[in-house]
Structure formats: structure tokens, C-alpha cells
Image (cartoon, helix red, strand yellow):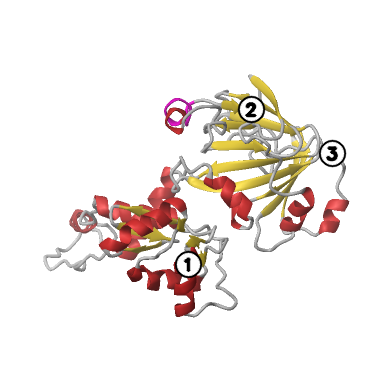
Amino acid sequence: MNNTLLGGLSPTRFLRDVWHKRPLLIRNAVPGFTGLLSPDDMLHLAGRNDVESRLIQGSGTHWQLDHGPFRKSEFKRLPKTAWTLLVQSLNHVLPAADALLARFNFIPHARLDDLMASYAVPGGSVGPHFDSYDVFLLQGQGHRRWQISTQTDLALLDDAPMKILRRFEAEDEWLLGPGDMLYLPPHVAHYGVAEDACMTYSIGFRAPTAEELAHGFLMHLQDTLTLEGRYADPDLRLQTHPGEISRAMLNQIEGMIARIKWTRPDIAEFAGCYLSDPKPNVFFDAPDSPLSRAAFGKQADRFGVALDPKSRLLFTGGRFFINGEAFTPAADETPALQQLGDQRRLSPPLPAGLRGRLYDWYQAGWLEVDIP
């Protein structure tokens, strides 16, 4: 990683002194960077059914939010100012976006979310708001003026279709041009307004709430837990009130539920499946004309393989997780799978025992031959 990305800071120092602690403006973070796609490319992506897109119009206390896909004719009817088009998960559909996201791999893959592109005409904005996760805002073409605030008043407008702050008092302000980047930790209020037709690329991170994790873990227990026995009351006594739930019944139910226990490996299994599971709107496409097993082996041994941009491969200890599924490989396969998880690519030659698993992933659309 070049030392301009973090303003001359090493990843170690950035994580120690900046990450999750304070905003950081980085001028010329990506030298020569003018963006990954044109406005026309954005409009085309916003018309696809497999791409999540949003159109935001307005300012002040008046906002309108529409969800794609959109027809190009809809953009022709828009005013020349004060609207923004957002395209989510650009790294799933654009190799250059996936490569850009890979430059931030000093953050664990389990925390990386996606790369969002924002195209705005002059005056375009998504309003003053805050995020509950860390974000890097990398400027492509054009210029966007950012104001930030560490205010503790995070009250929102009542009737807005997005989370817009009711009050915003700027503490710092910068104009970002191509290649400049702004890092913001969670809950730092920010307000970006396009000075001219501009594009911003947002590198966002996963930060599930405690409630989301608890709900997911309870669902995981539901799928994996087995408790023997059934409620029984051979010593049942006549009750004065038939409608009363007796203390004896409550005690027995409490004892049955108290048998629910979990261990650190249970937590690791849940975390691996949960954090590698694709979002509900992510689908994988199998190859139209798949290679035979033998042909795949020859190609993979020549060029290596790469994960599909939508795939997530994580591991802890000797346990691996891909797209919500868990498995334990043979010991001699572990180093290669760790390389694939870390680098999202596996250079040839491939371990012989791993070829069958990789071929199955290839057929499912989770992996491809890494042909230059």
C-alpha cells in the first residue's frame, strides 16, 4: 500500500491514532484518481435490476427519495441542480471498484462492506447526517464541499425519507477535489454538497447492532440446538385457580431453558456464517458454459483462481466460512485457503486436494479462473 492513501501514516499508526477516534482529511490520497466510471455509466448501472440504486432530491427540510431501477428518460426530466444518484455495491459489478476496495485491506475483510458511488449535480447532497459505521469518502471527478461536526445532538427530521439531522452546526469545512479523501469515524455528523457535477466513492464498513447480532445468534441456535426431554408433571397437584400458571410449572420451564448453553466455538461458528453471509439482494450467477472438471483444473493450475467480487471467505482457527457456509479443510489445504481468504486470489499451482472444492465453488459462481 502506498503511503499517500493514509496521508503518510502507516496502517499500524492509522489504526492506533485515527481509526474510530477522529476525522482525518487526506489530500491527494490517491494521486491521479479521477474516478472509476462516468456519469453515463452511473445512469446505466442505475437502470439494472441487479444493482441497488437510489435517487435523492431536495435540500433543507424538503427531501425526496426514490429507489431504482430507473429509466434514462427519468433523469432527463430532473432539474439541473440539487439531486444525487447513489449506486450501492459498485465492487460487485466493476472490477476496478473491487480493486480499489482491496486497497483498504488493512481493515479485516469481516468489517469491509462495500463501495458506493455517488453522482451529484451542482447543489446535490444527501443532507446533513451521521453514519453508525466508519467511512472513507474518496473524491473522483469534480468537487464536493464537506462540513463536519462532532455535535452530540443527533435528533432527526420527523418526516424526511432519510435520516437527516434536524440541526447541524459545522465545526470544520473542506473542499475536496479529485484524489482527496476524508475519513470519518462513526457518529461524526457530515454534510457534503456538490460544487459542480461530481462523483464521490464511499468505502463503508459493517457495524451490526447488538440487537442484530443477538437476533442472528438466536436464529443460529434455533437451527443448531437440540434439547432432549419434554415437559412432564407426574406430581401434579390440584390447584385452587385452574387459570393460574403455577410456581412448579415456571420452575420446570426455567430449568429446561437454563440448559441452553453455548461455547466459544459456537460463537465462532455463528460469527463466521453471519459475517460471510451475502446480503439478501446478492445473487450468484453460475457460468453460462462451465468448464469441465478436467479443463477447470488445467486452467486453474495455469492461471490460478479468484473469488467472485460478491463472495466472502473468512476463517478462524482451522474453520473456514464462505458465503454463509462452514467447513473444515484438510490441514495441507489450510495455507492455500488462507491465501485465498486474505488476497482473494490463489496463485498456481493449486493443492491437488483442493481442486474438487474449488470446482464446486466455480460451478456455483462463487469463484472464477483468474485469467489475466
User: Where 195 sits versus 285, above or below?
Assistant: above
Nearer the observer: mark 1 or 2; the answer is 1
The residue depicted at 55 percent of the width and 73 percent of the height is: 286
Percent across and percent down for residue 264 are 25, 50
Q: Nearer the viewer, residue 45 or 53?
A: 45
Kind of residue at disc 2: Arg
Q: In whole angstroms, how far apart are the C-alphas of marks 3 and 1?
A: 52 Å
Percent across and percent down for residue 54 are 70, 50
Residue occupied by mark 3: 81
Q: Secondary structure at mark 3?
A: loop
Mark 3 is surrounded, within 10 Å at the Cα level, by few (under 14), some (14 to 19) or many (20 or more) other residues, namely some
Kind of residue at disc 1: Arg
Q: Secondary structure at mark 1?
A: helix
Residue occupied by mark 2: 27
Q: Quadrant of residue 194?
A: top right
Percent across and percent down for residue 200 are 68, 40
- Over which residues does the magenta segment extend? 15-21
Q: Nearer the viewer, residue 27 or 262?
A: 27
78 is within the stretch colored magenta:
no
Q: In whole angstroms, how far apart are the C-alphas of marks 2 and 3?
A: 27 Å
Q: In whole angstroms, how far apart are the C-alphas of marks 1 and 2?
A: 41 Å
Q: Find out whether the residues at labels 3 and 1 contact each other: C-beta distance under 8 Å.
A: no
Q: Earlier in the sequence, mark 3 or mark 1?
A: 3
